Image: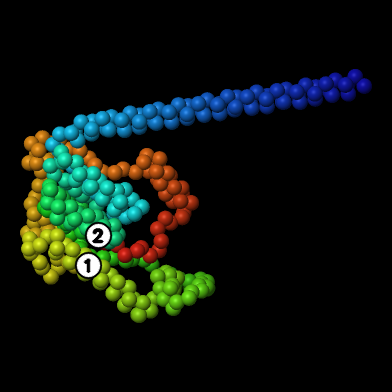
Amino acid sequence: MSEHTSESSRNEQATLALLLQRMLNEQRRARRGRWIWRVFKLLMFIVVVLWLCGVLGRALSSGDEEARPHVGLVRIDGVISPDDDANADALIGALDDAWENTHTVSVVLLINSPGGTPVQAQRVYDEIMRLRKLGDKPIDAVIEDMGASGAYYIASAADHIYASSSSLVGSIGVISAGFGYDEAMKKVGIERRVYTAGSNKDMLDPFRPVSEEQRGHLQAVLNSTHQRFIADVKAGRGDRLHETPDMFSGLVWSGEQAVALGLVDELKSIDVLVREKVDDRTAVVDYTVEQPLFDRMSKRLGVAAMSALGIDTASSYKPVRAQLP
């Protein structure tokens, strides 16, 4: 009886010790979690404060700069599309802000872009042409590493285009690209079932073969968009173009070659141009509209998450684009 009682007591003590150990572990985890949360909140607070200080500092400094003669800078970086920083709404807003400031002596487009959608490029082109007709101040374009396709479309509306000798310029063409998976579907024995009202509603479906009629129709769309692109470049550049058979074929040229073709007026950097305008390389106000920090972070996190899950963020068929592939 005493042995049974002793063993029972030992079991109870062991159970109690185990429970106490678990409670201690839970408390440690809870404390660790609270500390992690506190550190995270502190870091977020620091990031927000630094961001607000940066915004306030830029606002104060730009306010002083905007009150004296300056060059109004509008950056066109990356792909030109509704979903990117270089979209028509943002670029037109920046152009108008720079133009309307009475202290702006010149507006300069600083371009480093492979192009983008024809609609976005054409909207910016049209706005530059409208401002040029007002004749109040010059609008110049400076191409850095690349000013191709839709980016050159925009640049061609400027009063003058400048580039470096090694800049990539041109690519006056239109592209629509994708993949066809119809043969692969047959090999794996999968049937795709699509129901449409309209015999050509699924003409861009990558899982179905493309008929010659559909191919011809899409080519006609591309040709029409290309002809508008060519006409606008000619209207913007005028008799400065030295047209060649390959000029509108989609080829790109170096900045030096582009000068000889009349696609660029002169080899000149942004620093030299600003000094010529205002005698002070620092007298520049950047009117470029940036996406809010939260939007940029959300977009990047979303793309990263979809990539990690193996989800393609682009459709199989790209829309019609004035862009280097």
What residue lies at 26% left-to-right and 57% top-to-bottom? 123
Tag count: 2
Q: Which residue is mark 2?
A: 122
- Per the image, label 1 sits on a secondary structure element best described as helix
Q: Position of residue 233 (x, y in %)?
A: 16, 62
Q: Nearer the viewer, residue 205 or 107?
A: 107
* Amino acid type, residue under disc 2 in the picture: Gln
The image quadrant of residue 126 is bottom left
Which residue shows up at 23% across the image and 44% down it? 97
The residue lying at 84 percent from left, 24 percent from top is 8
Q: Residues within 10 Å of mark 2 (few under 14, many from 20)?
A: many
Q: Are marks 1 and 2 in contact (CB under 8 Å)?
A: yes
- Residue 323, percent across and down? 26, 59
Where residue 206 sits in the image (x, y, percent)? 42, 69
Separation of marks 1 and 2 at Cα, in angstroms: 9 Å
What amino acid type should be assigned to the residue bearing mark 1?
A: Arg
Q: Which corner quadrant of the image does residue 277 belong to? A: top left
Residue 61 seen by the camera: yes
Q: Residue at x 80, y 23 (%)?
A: 12
Residue 17 vs 59, above or below: the answer is: above
Q: Which quadrant is the C terminus positioned in?
A: bottom left
Q: Earlier in the sequence, mark 1 or mark 2?
A: 2
* Residue 304 visible in image: no
| Callout 2 secondary element | helix
Q: Which residue is mark 1?
A: 228
Looking at the figure, which quarter contains the N terminus?
top right
Drawn side of residue 80 relative to residue 130, left or right? right
Q: Position of residue 208 (x, y in %)?
A: 44, 73
